[in-house]
Amino acid sequence: MPRRLRQILVHLPSRCGHDSTMEYLTSTDGVSSRQLSGFFAGWPSPPSPERHLALLRGSSHVVLARTDDEIIGFVTAISDGALAAYIPLLEVRREWQGQGVGGELLRRLLGQLEAFYMVDVVCDPALIPFYERFGMAPLAGLARRNRSALA
């Protein structure tokens, strides 16, 4: 699936010390690992910025939030291109949380995925209300984690 760079500029009024223009990108073109610090807070073995960039580039769909040449949020999806998509990661840097960035990232990603029959996400129970606001519903599911793969 070819990726087109799409930028949308949004001016952010000063809030929590931030007064800048936010760009939402749908491509990793021009993104470097040095722009990817401050993510995966609380992970036992967080991916390096280089591995983070690799996972962004390997995703079938991506939306990035960027301000002042710094990535401050991202969401990814993996898809079969026909029927199903899975959203493995949505993260916003701690200092930008609570300002609508995560919701806007998800809204834009779901717009890219609207033709798919199923879009699934696995999240912590505390995040279920966030995803429900976007029309998602809790379902039973199973998961396996190989923590050694993070090392």
Image: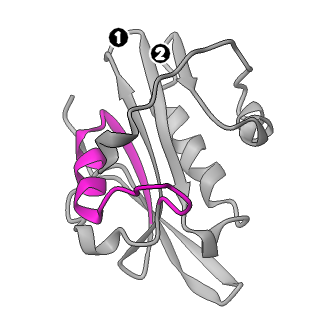
Residues at marks 2 and 1 touching, judged by CB atoms closer than 8 Å: yes
Quadrant location of the N terminus in the rendered image: top left
Magenta residues, as a range?
Answer: 40-65
Mark 1 Cα-neighbour bin, 10 Å: few <14, some 14–19, many ≥20: few
User: How far across and down, in percent of the image, does residue 60 sit?
Assistant: 30, 33
Residue type (three-letter) at the residue carrying disc 2: Phe
User: How far across and down, in percent of the image, does residue 47 sit?
Assistant: 34, 56
* Residue labelled with disc 1: 82
Mark 2 Cα-neighbour bin, 10 Å: few <14, some 14–19, many ≥20: some
Check residue 12 for magenta coloring. Answer: no
User: How far across and down, in percent of the image, does residue 86 sit?
Assistant: 46, 25
Query: Is 92 positioned to the left or the right of 59 in the image?
Result: right
Corner quadrant of residue 76: top left
Provide the secondary structure element on which disc 2 rests. loop
Residue appearing at x 35%, y 11% in the figure: 82
First reached walking from the N terminus: tag 2 or tag 1: 1
Residue appearing at x 68%, y 12% in the figure: 140
Q: Is residue 43 above or below residue 113?
A: below
Query: Is 4 positioned to the left or the right of 24 in the image?
Result: left
- Comparing 120 with 41, the one in front is 41
- Comparing 117 with 21, the one in front is 117
Q: Is residue 113 above or below residue 39?
A: above
Residue sticking out furthest to the front = 148
User: How far across and down, in percent of the image, does residue 13 sit?
Assistant: 67, 82
Check residue 44 for magenta coloring. Answer: yes
Residue appearing at x 74%, y 20% in the figure: 137
Residue appearing at x 56%, y 16% in the figure: 142
Residue type (three-letter) at the residue carrying disc 1: Ala
* Residue labelled with disc 2: 116
